[in-house]
């Protein structure tokens, strides 16, 4: 403890007692950067890898804030998550709608938190997103290729 206090004191004295440092050199004005080129939109039924990576980095909780779901049960057994509402532009062009019941993502069950989290994290290395849904009593799979690029 005493050596820590002494070290802090020496650092403080050295910082206070030294000759003031000369002002930093002024950098020459840089030329304005060229306007960024707009990224080409992802093909239909595809999503950019950068978008998937950003979603994973933000976390499942932030992703789930863009929709409301409720558990769909049949005879007391969990079937899937019924979509109640989809919010935001991220859902435009996506073939999901209120009333759809999501039963799996990339083959993963999603009933429990740890299952949903595993499905979400699996997207980091996946080449596509597969969402299994029940719509009007019929099972189908919605697929999105994950394409490279910004």
Image (tube, rainbow, N blue to C red):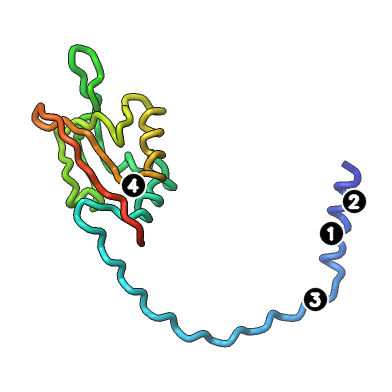
Badge 4 marks a residue whose secondary structure is: loop
Q: Nearer the viewer, mark 2 or mark 4?
A: 4
Q: Nearer the viewer, residue 117 or 126?
A: 126
Badge 1 marks a residue whose secondary structure is: helix
Q: Quadrant of residue 11?
A: bottom right
Which quadrant is the C terminus positioned in?
A: bottom left
As drawn, is 92 to the left or to the right of 51? left
Badge 2 marks a residue whose secondary structure is: helix
Label drawn at residue 6: 2
Query: Badges 2 and 4: C-beta atoms under 8 Å apart?
Result: no
Residue to which mark 1 is pinned: 11
How packed mark 4 is, by other alpha carbons closer than 10 Å (few <14, some 14-19, many 20 or more), is few
Q: Nearer the viewer, mark 1 or mark 4?
A: 4
Give the x, y percent position of residue 100.
16, 34
Label 1 to label 4: alpha-carbon separation? 53 Å
Label 2 to label 1: alpha-carbon separation? 9 Å
Residue to which mark 3 is pinned: 20
Query: Badges 1 and 4: C-beta atoms under 8 Å apart?
Result: no
Which quadrant is the N terminus positioned in?
A: top right
Query: Does label 4 or label 3 sit earlier along the sequence?
Result: 3
Q: Residue furthest left?
A: 136
């Amino acid at each position: 403890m005493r050596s820590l206090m002494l070290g802090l004191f020496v650092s403080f004295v050295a910082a206070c007692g030294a000759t003031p440092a000369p002002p930093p050199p002024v950098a020459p004005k840089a030329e304005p950067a060229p306007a960024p080129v707009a990224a080409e939109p992802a093909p239909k039924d595809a999503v950019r890898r950068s978008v998937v990576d950003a979603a994973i980095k933000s976390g499942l909780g932030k992703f789930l804030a863009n929709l409301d779901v409720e558990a769909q049960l049949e005879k007391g057994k969990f079937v899937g998550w019924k979509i109640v509402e989809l919010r935001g532009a991220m859902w435009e062009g996506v073939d999901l709608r209120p009333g759809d019941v999501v039963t799996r993502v990339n083959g993963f069950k999603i009933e429990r938190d740890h299952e949903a989290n595993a499905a979400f994290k699996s997207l980091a290395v996946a080449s596509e997103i597969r969402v299994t849904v029940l719509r009007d009593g019929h099972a189908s799979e919605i697929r999105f290729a994950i394409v490279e690029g910004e």
